[in-house]
Amino acid sequence: MTLDEKLRRETEAVNVAALEVVGVSHFYGKRKALDDVSFMVEPGSFTVLLGLNGAGKSTLFSLITRLYVTRAGTIRIFGYDVNRHPGEALRRLGVVFQPRTLDLELTVMQNLIYHAALHGIGPGEAKRRARDVLARANLADRASERVRNLSGGYIRRVEIARAFLHRPDLLLLDEATVGLDVKARADIIAQVRSLVASEGIGVLWTTHLIDEIAKTDSVVILHEGKIREKGLATEILARTGAPDMRAAFVKVTGAEVQQGDGP
Amino acid sequence: MTLVAAGAPRKAFGPAQYAICMQGIIWREALRFIHQRGRFISALVRPLVWLFIFASGFRAVLGISIIPPYQTYVTYDVYITPGLMAMIQLFNGMQSSLSMVYDRETGNMRTLLVSPFPRWYLLTSKLLAGTAVGILQVYTYLAIAYLWGISPDSLWGYLTVFPALVLSGLMLGALGMVLSSLIRQLENFAGVMNFVIFPMFFASSALYPLWQVQEKSPWLATICWFNPFTYAVELIRFAFYEQVDYFSLVIVVGCMVVFLAGAILAYDPARGMLIRRGGAAE
């Protein structure tokens, strides 16, 4: 490949969406979990996928990460169709799942080396990168600790650090703060926003907690499997005429939300 | 700091990256095994109980006539040693499948399945990792059996049995993988013990020569002949005495291919097995 061609392809790559979900539907038996869902995540943007429990967020997550196969619609990561080119698509993806996915029997460092191997990174380079991401997440002193001995907040922070290890271009986090106390939640959000700012990668942050949204974020509201609203947080507020995002959510979904149990 | 533009084309994985991935999966399985000392001890105690107690008791009343690959009459503990080697692998294969069910329930399986390497390669690596752990257990057992006075005709037997252990380990591990895709919850694993492990072990040539079974119970002998575990035992038995039982070799390789294909299909997202077995929480 010539230098010109390389530059052209890199420029093209920058111009495509980090994540493109087009007309995706999904069924569990006869129940429709997702109904013609379409939205985009731009490179370098922080996009919040907001919805109540059962809205279809985790199903969408499983489709994007190819745990489920997309039968209706298309999902592309930096232009690579997840069904047709899963390897190329998944290489660009860093994922933090809602359930804990670290091996409790291994140490933090061993978990990171294992993850690196699953992305073709050898142990030497993996250790170097692991020390780097752990230091940036203020976890350097936890490297040799068995995961079983860590608190929920620390486990989550390690998972986020791990997601950066193979230098993804797009980061997916599914309800990353569920079950954590207020301080741990704030720490994790700050950690992700800080890493995203320094790395310049796209983020899809799924949550049912309204206070995790910043004014500069892009927001996609998913309710009962359908997209009800999408755009910058400020745009959604302007369009709905709602005083805050909670009111905007209630307005576009018609959901009755009690204080403290959702958006 | 990222060195390339976001989403820019990346260099394709070469053989070195594939090797790193497989090495990592085997390394993790070995680490887990080392950390679970109870698993290692119970994996050894089980065949040793058979050898030291069961076989010793029967040794006094039971001798095995000359049947291939033996050149002479052998004592019962010598006869059942290959069967116990296969038993270690059978239990290890099922333990690996239990571990996969556990990984699925705890969410750890997702770490593996979102790797950019092909799904078939990840599962094959996982299978090799389980087989490697099983072979380690077999050789530890053989070292103890040696002190008990049980060894092959020459030390070469320890080497020639290795490929047989690899093939039988892969076959039984692949069977375990298929089962892991069928088990909905960890609690259901007891059923595997009752309906898979024990019938496979007892209805085989592991504990008694099939010609003797044929004399006493032809229908049981027929079941034994249809049991793939019988061929794993015989492949190991012959290899331990530096011989090849080609018929067993063909059956073991054939079953291994079928079971592995089944496991790959079961874990293929397009087949939907993962969806029904808790691939993601809604």
Image: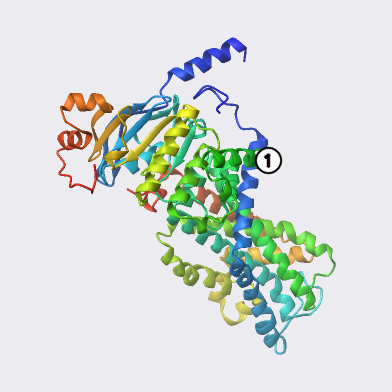
Q: Quadrant of residue B201?
A: bottom right
Q: Residue furthest front?
A: A183
Image height of A40 relative to A137, above or below: above
Among the 4 quarters of the image, the one containing residue B236: bottom right
Depth order, front residue of B94/A123:
A123
Q: In the rendered structure, the residue with mark 1 lies on which chain?
A: A
* Residue carrying label 1: A124
Q: Does residue B142 appear in this view?
A: yes
Labels in figure, total: 1
Relative to residue B27, is residue B241 depicted above or below? below
Amino acid carrying mark 1 in the image: Gly
A261 left or right of B30 in image:
left
Q: Answer with the quarter of the image where residue A219 lies.
A: top left
Question: Extreme top residue here?
Answer: A4
Q: Secondary structure at mark 1?
A: helix
Residue A81 on image: x %, y %? 43, 29
Which residue, as the protein is rendered here, is positioned at the far bottom? B61
Colour treatment of the image: rainbow
Give the residue at x 17% y 45%. Answer: A257
Residue B40: percent from the left, percent from the top? 63, 67
**Residue A241 locus on image (x, y percent):** 15, 27
Q: Residue at x 34, y 43 (%)?
A: A58
Residue at left offset 52%, top offset 40%: B115
Identify which residue, A201 or B102, lies in the foreground: A201
Q: Give neighbour class at mark 1: few <14, some 14-19, many 20+ (Cα, 10 Å).
A: few
For the N terminus of chain B, give its image quadrant. top right
Q: Is residue B252 visible?
A: no
Q: Residue B158 versus residue A160: which sits nearer the camera?
A: A160
With A30 as the anchor, is A79 left or right in this view?
A: right
